[in-house]
Image (spheres, helix red, strand yellow):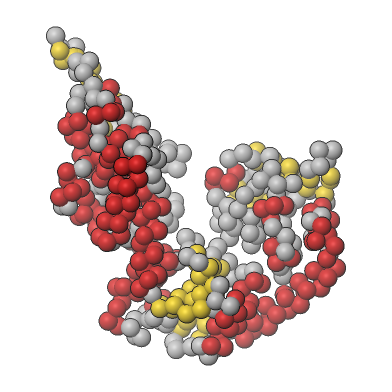
Amino acid sequence: MKISFAPIQNYNSGARQKQTPSSDLKYQYNLNADTVSFGAIKKNKLDGYQLLSANYFKAPLEKFKDQEDFKDWARTSLSEKMKPDSYPCESELDSKEREKRLTEWRQYMFSDRFMLDHPTLALYVADSITKDLYPDTKNFPPLFDTESMKKTLNEIDVILEKNPKANISFPKKYNHNLKQKMLNAAEKFPDQSTNGRMYWVRVPSFEHDPEHIDKNLKIINCISAEAWCTKGHFASKYLKNGDFFILMDKNNPELSVRLEGEDKIAEVRDRNHNSNFGLSYLEPLKTLAQEKNLSGFEGEFQNLQRRQDVLNIAKEISADDIQNKNYANILRSSGIEVKELDDGMLELAKFQKAAKEFTYEDLGISENEMFKHIKKINGNANFEGTQVTNLGALKEIGGYTFASQSKLNYESFKNVKQGGRTFWD
């Protein structure tokens, strides 16, 4: 009597729930009493891509009788994962943008000879680019680019040759290569206010560069911050109206300036899509406006200068506390009741940014460092407009949490007990 376990693909296709990690494949097996076999492929018999995929998916190799069986499973899984219309958004336009990008990836995966010969690699790539495409988010798969894909696979080959068991992030490597290619193709000029430490990227409008519309759309899609709508279909809408400038710190987008017409500033946003951005951007923005003779932002510049004047006064008053990193006094000066605990940690009645006009970062205080000393917030915690990315020693928030226009995400609160809802919008 021969016994075999026949794998049936059963992991989530289509729109997945946020609670289900996309990389956790679920399997079901049929046990047929007249076809049972205890033969199984071994990890040491797998090539680099097969081993990479097996480790990534935690695939039960004991259920596959040979490498072809494993490949067949990968082909079936890939077809399910890359089904058309499987990743809708709440917005119809966002759904179309996702489908447009996934169509290019599907065409590559189902026609490229190398990917056809390595279905386990194709499945690994497919899961990597679709794992965050939940219905209630505005995430998109990366744009497909043949050159960036080849470079990424070459890098993966080198890593696997040195360490066959390496844990590799395909999205991180691919997005880096794609972004670097787009930056190399973009028009750049140094920001004089930072002595060239930062630089500006100009993405010309359709009217100013009609011969390179597709290239410019790819540039703005690829180098925009995650919170910006120019990561998606809005890039086309904006470039129809005017040029788009992005302030970069190394390869990281910091500020966007959208024009209407030839020289009118229509909108400015920081990397969190916040229009009430930090004062550290004041000088780069003023320098850009002067160098490019931009108009339409005079009132906002006056408001920024007023905020700067208020900040200067606050710095002067709190100079000793800032220098000594006396977080308790600095928080108290922002109207927050602070209790200093026996273990040296702080318990706050609430949390909010330093003032309407400025943040703790503007004062010269690292908010991430400050949260290494904050253990509990009894009331509401409002992170809007702050620069916090790591909640450090924080263990509990008693009230509501407001995280829109912040740098925090779901993962940020994994070690924090929360008494009330978290608001992301």
Q: Position of residue 118 (x, y in %)?
A: 21, 42
Q: Position of residue 225 (x, y in %)?
A: 48, 63
Residue projecting furthest to the top: 1
Q: Is residue 241 placed above or below 10 in the rendered structure? A: below
Q: Position of residue 7 (x, y in %)?
A: 24, 27
Query: Which quarter of the figure is the N terminus placed in?
Result: top left
Q: Quadrant of residue 336?
A: bottom right
Q: Position of residue 222 (x, y in %)?
A: 39, 65
- Between residues 213 and 197, which one lies in front from this camera angle? 197
Q: Is residue 352 placed above or below 185 in the rendered structure? A: above
- Between residues 273 and 197, which one lies in front from this camera angle? 197
Q: Is residue 379 left or right of residue 123?
A: right
Name the residue rendered at 72%, 75% in the picture: 307
Q: Is residue 279 left or right of residue 139?
A: right
Q: Is residue 149 left or right of residue 361?
A: left
Name the residue rendered at 20%, 55% in the picture: 107
Residue projecting furthest to the front: 162
Query: Which quarter of the figure is the C terminus placed in?
Result: bottom right
Name the residue rendered at 54%, 65% in the picture: 271
